[in-house]
Amino acid sequence: MELAREVRSFLEERGIGEKDCLLLALSGGRDSLCLFHVLVELRPLMGYRLRAMYVHHGLRREADEEAAWLRRCCLVQEVPFTVAYVNVGERVEQTKESVEEAARALRYRALEEEGRKQDAWILTAHHAQDQAETVLLRLLRGSGLRGLGGMTAQRGRLLRPLLGVEPARIVKYMEERELCWRQDASNEDLRYTRNWVRHRLIPLLEEKNPAVQRSLRELADQARQDEEYMEREAEAVFREAYDGEGLSIPILEKAPAALQGRVLFCFLRQKGGTRNVGRVHIQMLKEICRGPQGGEGTAPGGRVFYRSYDRLLMRKKEDRALPQAGVELAWDGLWHDTPWGRFRVRKMENPFQNFQQIPDLPYTKWVNCDTITEQLVARTRRQGDYLGVGGGHQSLKKYMVNAKIPREERDRMAVLACGSHVLWVVGKRLSEEARLTQHVTQVVCIEYDPKKEEENNCWNPKETE
C-alpha cells in the first residue's frame, strides 16, 4: 500500500480526480505493469478514468504477441486499450537519428496525439534508475545545466509518478502480489546506448561509488533548481532588452555571461520558436552580437538574424528587397496602390497661414509645388539619390546611415522622388527643398497608407487639421 499511497499523493497534488482521464503508456515490462496495477488499485478510490496505450515500433517480432497479451490484461481490469503503430525505420531514414532516438520521438508523438484526443493526462513508468541513466546519457552526448536536470516528474500533461521510486520497491510490489510481466530481450542489447549505460557503465561506476545512482539523481535535482533560477533571471533580462522587434545588444552584454545564452534562447523562442535549435545557433547569435554592423547568420525555420547598429534583428530568409521600378503618381486626389502601400496626391492652394500651423504627421506631408519639376514617382532607393539637408545636398545613402536605418530596411523603404531628388523618405525625412516657405501659394499634399486598402476618397484639409 505504501507505493500506492505515494502515487495517490502525487496525483492529488496535481488536482487529479473523478473528472480526469489518465492515459498510461503501457508495455509488457515490469515497471510499466507495476504502474498499471497501482492505477487500477487507486481508480475506485479516486474516481478517474483509466486508459492504456501500447506503442508498436515494428522492431521486435514479439511485439504482436505482447500487444495481444496486454489487451487481455486490460480486458480483465476493464481498462480501454489502444495500439499505436509507428514506423521507426522510415523516421531513421528521414532524420538520420539513431533507432533509440527515432523510437522515443515517435512514441511520445503517438501518446500526445492520443492524449489530446482523449483530453487525458499521459503517464509513463520512468523510475529512479531511469533518471540516473538519463543524466549519464546526456553527459555522454554533451549537455548544459538544463540537460543535467534529467527528466521532470511533470512536463505539461505528461506525468512520471514513479520517478523517485527505486527499482527494488517496484520488484517488491510485483512479487508480493504475484503479478506477471514480460522480459524484453532488446533491453539486453548493448548496441543501444541506454542498455550499455545500464549494464556496463553504471556497474563500473558503482565499483568506485556504490551510491553513484543516488549521486546522479541529487545532481539532477540540484541542476534543475539552478536552471529554474537562471531561467527566471534570463527572462527578466530579456524583457528589458526586447523592444517588440529586436534585442538590445548593450543590455545583453551587460548581463552575466551565464545568462547571455539563455537570453538569446528567449529571443529565438520569441522569434519563431526553438525547434531544432542547438548550442551552435546560440553561439552564432553571440558572434553576430560581438561582430560588426550587418553581420548575419541563419537559424532553423528559414530565419536570418543580423546586427543592425546596437540591435539584434530577424528577417525571414525569403524576404527580398521590393522592386526598384517606380510607380508614377497622378495628382488626382485618388488612392493609388503600389508595392509599398498606397498614396494619394492632390494640388491645392496653401491652406496654412504660417509655419506653426503645419502638422508634423508621419504619413502626410505638404510639399512645395515648385519643387516637383519631374514626374512624381514612388519607388525604392537608387544610386545617386539625394535630398536637401542644411542648405545643401546629402546622398540618400549617407542620410540612411546617419539616421541608423537598418541595412535590411533600406532597400525596402519607399521614397517619393522627382528624378534623383528624394522629396520624402516615407515615414521619416522630408527634403528641405520641398518644405513650404512663406511665399509658397501652391502646395501638393501627399498621403501614405501602408495597408493598401481599396478606397478612393478625395483629400479633405479637415482630415489632417
Image (cartoon, rainbow, N blue to C red):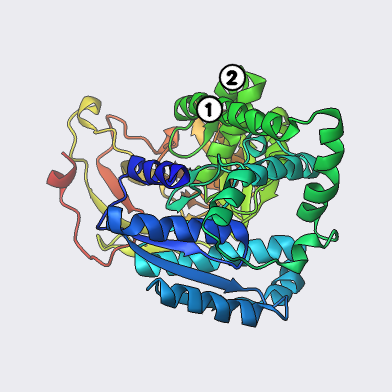
Q: Which residue is mark 1?
A: 234
| Image position of 396 with respect to 44: above or below | above
Residue type of the residue flagged with mark 2: Ala
Tell me where residue 145 appears, x and y as whole percent: 66, 32
Vertical order, 212 against 302 (above or below): above
Q: Is residue 86 above or below residue 122?
A: below
Task: Give the residue type at disc 1.
Answer: Ala
323 relative to 289 in the view: left or right: left
- Between disc 2 and disc 1, the foreground one is 1
Name the mark on residue 323.
none
Q: Secondary structure at mark 1?
A: helix
Asked if one can make out residue 385 in the rendered structure from this viewpoint, the answer is no
Q: Residue furthest left?
A: 462
Q: Position of residue 244 (x, y in %)?
A: 43, 38
Question: Residue 3, relative to residue 118: is it above or below?
Answer: above
Measuring 69% from the left and 73% from the top, which residue is drawn there?
88
Q: Nearer the viewer, residue 312 or 378?
A: 312
Quarter holding the C terminus?
top left
Q: Residues within 10 Å of mark 1 (few under 14, many from 20)?
A: many
Query: Counting residues from the N terminus, which is met first, the one under dot 2 or under dot 1?
Result: 1
**Residue 336 location, quadrant:** bottom left
Q: Secondary structure at mark 2?
A: loop
- Mark 2 touches mark 1? (CB < 8 Å): yes
Which residue is tagged 2? 255
The answer to whether residue 441 shows anywhere in this view is: yes
Q: Report x, y in % for residue 144.
A: 69, 34
In percent of width and height, residue 370 lies at 37, 45
Left or right: 52, with 438 as reference point: right
Q: Residue at x 76, y 73 (%)?
A: 93
